[in-house]
Image (spheres, rainbow, N blue to C red):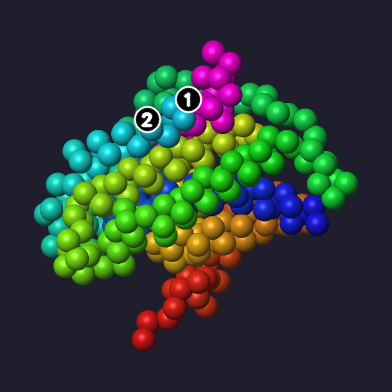
């Protein structure tokens, strides 16, 4: 039970991180390799606001998310949209976006190293026990999980209960058909990319409340987010949330029962199994 609860708490934060990449890759067709750097930058901003001004990290999300939304929109408009326009097919766009965001990865990482150095950072926020089924858990992890569930629920309401959300899902399924029903595909894809950046930043702000981070760890979270996206099915929000919970529980089980050093190996092993037996994703349907 402790493994299940701890893994679910971790998986909730993973889900929020992966949902950002799900929107960016599923709707905007951009494989954003700098996704992890957005997360780490949000960690540093939350750390700075808390240690310098005493701003609650949960309230800091009200500043971090809009800032990440605007920055992601500018990146899409100035750097990625020209690649979208010149791409002759989806494969060409994916290759170009990988190369472009790979450069962004090193740019953002270099800026964070210049600003904060290569050391590790953390801060104490709600560092006290919270009992679930008579077992103690860190309150900051529980609060981060509840906040992640709330943000993910708002995202689902937006995607499945609003016209703009329906447009995002339509572009994710088939951009060509979306144009036939008067959807501005370019604008919708840009919005999806920007919203994905905001979600990733929210995940970073929550992660900073209980995780020790540094400027070079973004690649690790990019890989985990990519694994969750593919496991859940590209563009499938519900599949990404399920995959994140499974990954969190699997990592916790391996760390608790076998060896903490094997958590990354367990992640890739689970990923390979899904590729072999469910290549369409956990909730996806096989092609007819």
* Tag 1 residue: 45
Give the magenta-colored segment's residue range: 38-61
Q: Quadrant of the C terminus?
A: bottom left
Q: Position of residue 72 (x, y in %)?
A: 31, 38
Residue for point 42% across, 48% down: 20
Q: Label 2, secondary structure: give it.
A: helix
Residue for point 55% across, 61% down: 243
Q: Position of residue 175 (x, y in %)?
A: 23, 64
The circle drawn on residue 233 is none
Q: Quadrant of the N terminus?
A: bottom right
**Direction from residue 42 to residue 127 in the image, left or right:** right
* Tag 2 residue: 67
**Direction from residue 152 to residue 140 in the image, left or right:** right
Q: Foreground: 184 or 186?
A: 184
Q: Is residue 32 visible?
A: yes
Label 2 vs label 1, nearer the camera:
2
């Amino acid at each position: 039970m402790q493994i299940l609860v701890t893994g679910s708490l971790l998986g909730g934060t993973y889900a929020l991180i992966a949902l950002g990449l799900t929107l960016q890759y599923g709707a905007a067709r951009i494989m954003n390799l700098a996704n992890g750097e957005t997360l780490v930058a949000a960690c540093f901003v939350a750390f700075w606001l808390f240690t310098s001004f005493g701003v609650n990290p949960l309230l800091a999300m009200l500043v971090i998310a809009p800032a990440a939304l605007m920055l992601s929109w500018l990146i899409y408009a100035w750097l990625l949209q020209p690649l979208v326009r010149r791409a002759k097919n989806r494969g060409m766009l994916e290759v170009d976006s990988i190369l472009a965001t790979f450069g962004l990865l090193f740019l953002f990482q270099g800026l964070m190293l210049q600003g904060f150095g290569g050391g590790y950072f953390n801060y104490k926020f709600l560092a006290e026990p919270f009992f679930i089924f008579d077992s103690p858990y860190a309150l900051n992890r529980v609060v981060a999980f509840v906040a992640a569930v709330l943000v993910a629920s708002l995202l689902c309401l937006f995607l499945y209960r609003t016209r703009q959300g329906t447009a995002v899902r339509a572009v994710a399924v088939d951009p060509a058909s979306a144009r036939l029903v008067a959807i501005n595909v370019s604008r919708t894809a840009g919005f999806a990319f920007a919203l994905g950046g905001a979600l990733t930043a929210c995940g970073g702000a929550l992660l900073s409340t209980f995780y020790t981070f540094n400027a070079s760890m973004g690649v690790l979270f990019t890989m985990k987010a990519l694994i969750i996206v593919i496991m859940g099915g590209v563009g499938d929000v519900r599949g990404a949330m399920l995959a994140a919970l499974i990954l969190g529980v699997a990592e916790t089980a391996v760390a608790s029962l076998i060896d903490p050093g094997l958590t990354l190996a367990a992640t890739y092993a689970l990923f390979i199994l899904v590729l072999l037996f469910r290549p369409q994703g956990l909730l996806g349907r096989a092609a007819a």
